[in-house]
Amino acid sequence: MIAARNLLKAGLRKSIGTGATTAVWSDAWIPVTPPTQLVGKNVFKDPYLLVYHLIDQHTKVWKDEVLHQLFTAEEVKRIRCVKPSRTPQMDKFVWAYTKSGIYTVKTGYNLASDLKETSDSPQVLEPSVTALKSRVWTTKTTRKIKHFMWQSIAGCLPVKNNLVERHCGIDRLCPRCDAAPETPNHLLFECPAALQVRSISEFPYVLGDFPCDSLYKNVDHLFWRAKEANIPEKTIERFPWIMWYLWKARNEKVFNEKDIPPLDTFQLACPESENWTVAQLVDNPLENDVTPSSVAPTEQIITFPRCQSDASWCPNSSFFGKGFVIENENGERIWGASAEFQVSSPLHAELTALTWAMTMALQRGLYSLSFETDCMQLVKIIEDEEEWPTMASELEVFKFLRSSFSIFSLSFIPCLLNVRADSLSKGARARDCCFSYVDHSIPSWLVLETNQLN
């Protein structure tokens, strides 16, 4: 944990609840990647100033006068992307390199690699195996074999030589031939058992190139050079399975004292390779059937009363737009359009647009409503109740509003069926100012699009 502390500090930022535990100048709390601290104007910086002090505690909005006094215009724009919580939530750490704010091994590894590359410490110059590792994941084989191949290239395979290096044993010799240290390259390419399997497979021997004493050169030959040498693709595609069954044969020897002949290894690998290849070519039995996705949009079931919502977000804009259309079975409609200061992502905009539409519906006494959105990710977050720390305050508002409805549903619709809300949100953003419009008539500034909205 101590070893990973610097990595976590580099990737964590504060998600604002009340702002009472986040220091304005020393904590990273602005939703940018990588996480950075605010610089501010050339004014006195109170080291004890908290984000809490920048928020009006009655309205739960930013104190604009204070923001412009302390920060540059660009910093004010970024601060406004943060939405203070309207409920007494604690500030908490989130991972800045995922949309949800939850740490993942993949993003942690990528950040660690970037930090290593930019480090000022001297680096040992040696051949990079990054391309080989990346190529593994596009190999035509199963996931477990891909993972096995990646481990082999990365030096993580628990062969005897590696175990001794990690103080987990004293015997380095190959358990199958007792003639050389068991390294990944020896196991897969140089051991007599491996050489015999390669010979049976009719994979050509290339003097000085394949097989050789370099694992990376051997794998490079399988990935690229073999194809350039016009070796049959079927022969090349067998090799991941051959490598896998060489590993299994080795484990049989180590753990069960059982010797697997090279011919048996080859006869196990070939059918597995061919069966897997055939399985990838099997047609989907439902491919030619009528599925829900193939039904014309106009044939979808419509539940009234309903509310369609949408948001319009652009990365370089100072504002984002919101739009909704509430419609009942008699064709009566309520049109809503609004613009607010920019938020940190399109998903934040979509959820904010939805909660605004919910608020406007409740204010008009509509407690039974079916909501529709063209943002599939938003539907999944709400339906599956996924954990998204970066949207904690917005989700709290949503849960509070949803509890006020007697009947509530949220469903996904294609963009082509959400044209009206989309036009309202885009028109609202284009006005480039904060405003709110809710009425039974279409906004006058969208009069040119009346035909489309109807």
Image (cartoon, helix red, strand yellow):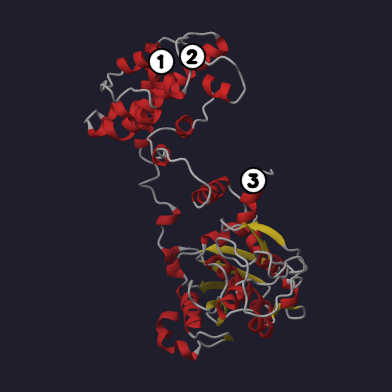
Q: Amino acid at mark 1?
A: Cys
Give the class, few, some or many, for how many residues have Cα within 10 Å of label 3's Cα (few <14, many ≥20): few
How far apart in space, not on screen, are marks 3 and 1 (Cα)? Answer: 38 Å
Residue 57 seen in render: yes
Ranked by sequence position, the earlier of labels 2 and 3 is 3
Give the class, few, some or many, for how many residues have Cα within 10 Å of label 1's Cα (few <14, many ≥20): many
- Residue hosting label 3: 4
Front in this rendered view, residue 150 or 174: 174
Say whether residue 421 is left or right of residue 403.
Answer: left
Ranked by sequence position, the earlier of labels 3 and 1 is 3
Q: Say which element carries label 1.
A: loop
Q: Say which element carries label 3.
A: loop
How far apart in space, not on screen, are marks 2 and 3 (Cα)? Answer: 35 Å
Q: Amino acid at mark 2?
A: Cys
Q: Which residue is located at x 54 percent, y 46 percent?
A: 109
- Residue hosting label 1: 191
Residue 265, labelled with which disc? Answer: none
Percent position (x, y) of residue 219?
A: 37, 30
Give the class, few, some or many, for how many residues have Cα within 10 Å of label 2's Cα (few <14, many ≥20): many
**Quadrant of the drawing holding the C terminus:** bottom left
- Do the CB atoms of the residues marked 2 and 1 lie less than 8 Å apart? yes
Q: Which residue is located at x 68 percent, y 64 percent?
A: 27
Percent position (x, y) of residue 428?
A: 51, 82
- Residue hosting label 2: 174
